[in-house]
Image (tube, rainbow, N blue to C red):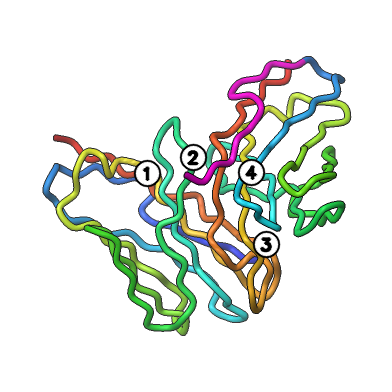
Amino acid sequence: DVKVTQSSRYLVKRTGEKVFLECVQDMDHENMFWYRQDPGLGLRLIYFSYDVKMKEKGDIPEGYSVSREKKERFSLILESASTNQTSMYLCASSSLGSAGPRSANEQFFGPGTRLTVL
Amino acid sequence: ILNVEQSPQSLHVQEGDSTNFTCSFPSSNFYALHWYRWETAKSPEALFVMTLNGDEKKKGRISATLNTKEGYSYLYIKGSQPEDSATYLCALLYNTDKLIFGTGTRLQVFP
């Protein structure tokens, strides 16, 4: 059974704290993604990675950084959390597309982390 | 800015009703369309990945069609059941590596 796990389901942090969200997949996927979900908006891509130590900015990377030291693990870092980063964060992974865009294949999602920044 | 629109925003149907909803998108530079189902308190899961104009895919009572020339996809659910209650997300892939998600259609099926 394929699995993407995230380190926490719920997290409460204070403004200015450094926050780490961890994601692990067991499918040997090359691609990993971080999204955030806010009411009334679609899932928005923060960062993605198509290989170890590789990262590319998504649509809303400001205020975030990522780390991919091992193939199975992709971390999202909020350097100094702010209240506007209160959101649901979803991690996903997919195998590398064999032709065309690298993220052509279906994505497998984790259960999400609901982060509240006070 | 590429925009993916889903309609309706929400839908309430009775058990046994068939239903359908729409994903609309700009058709130029289209590469693939993904449909996901997201049940409350669970992870989104992929239903279909569609790439060819005229594609039709089916999984049980759920099917989808794709028209890339006019920029839309329909998702159909035949004989809706309470367990079909979920948010259905459409996402588009153009000639980049980024999926662009719509805001979803929230379906509730009443027994």
**Left or right: B44 in relation to B110:** right
Q: Which quadrant holds residue B65?
A: bottom left
Task: Determine whether the residue tagged by mark 4 lies in a helix, strand or loop.
Answer: strand
- Residue B58 sits above or below residue B17 on the image: below
User: Do the CB atoms of the residues marked 4 and 3 lie less than 8 Å apart?
Assistant: no
User: Residue at 38% across / 79% down in the picture?
Assistant: B55
Q: Which mark is residue B98?
A: 3
Q: Nearer the viewer, mark 1 or mark 2?
A: 2
Marks 2 and 3, how far apart at CA: 19 Å
Marks 1 and 2, how far apart at CA: 15 Å
**Left or right: B34 in relation to A16:** left
Q: Inspect the image, locate mark 4, and give the three-letter code of the amino acid beneath it.
A: Gln
Going from N to C along the chain, the mark reached first, 2 or 3, is 2
Q: Which residue is mark 4?
A: A25
Q: Position of residue B91 (x, y in %)?
A: 53, 60
Q: Inspect the image, locate mark 3, and give the three-letter code of the amino acid beneath it.
A: Lys
* Total count of labels: 4
Q: Position of residue B108 (x, y in %)?
A: 27, 39
Q: Which quadrant holds residue B22?
A: bottom left
Q: Position of residue B102 (x, y in %)?
A: 52, 55
Identify the image quadrant of the C terminus of chain A: top right
Q: Which residue is mark 1?
A: B106
User: Do the CB atoms of the residues marked 1 and 4 lie less than 8 Å apart?
Assistant: no
- Share a chain, discs 2 and 4? no
- Residue B54 sits above or below residue A14 on the image: below
Marks 2 and 4, how far apart at CA: 14 Å
User: Residue at 27% across / 61% down in the picture?
Assistant: B76
Task: Determine whether the residue tagged by mark 2 lies in a helix, strand or loop.
Answer: loop
- Range shown magenta: A1-13
Q: Nearer the viewer, mark 1 or mark 3?
A: 3
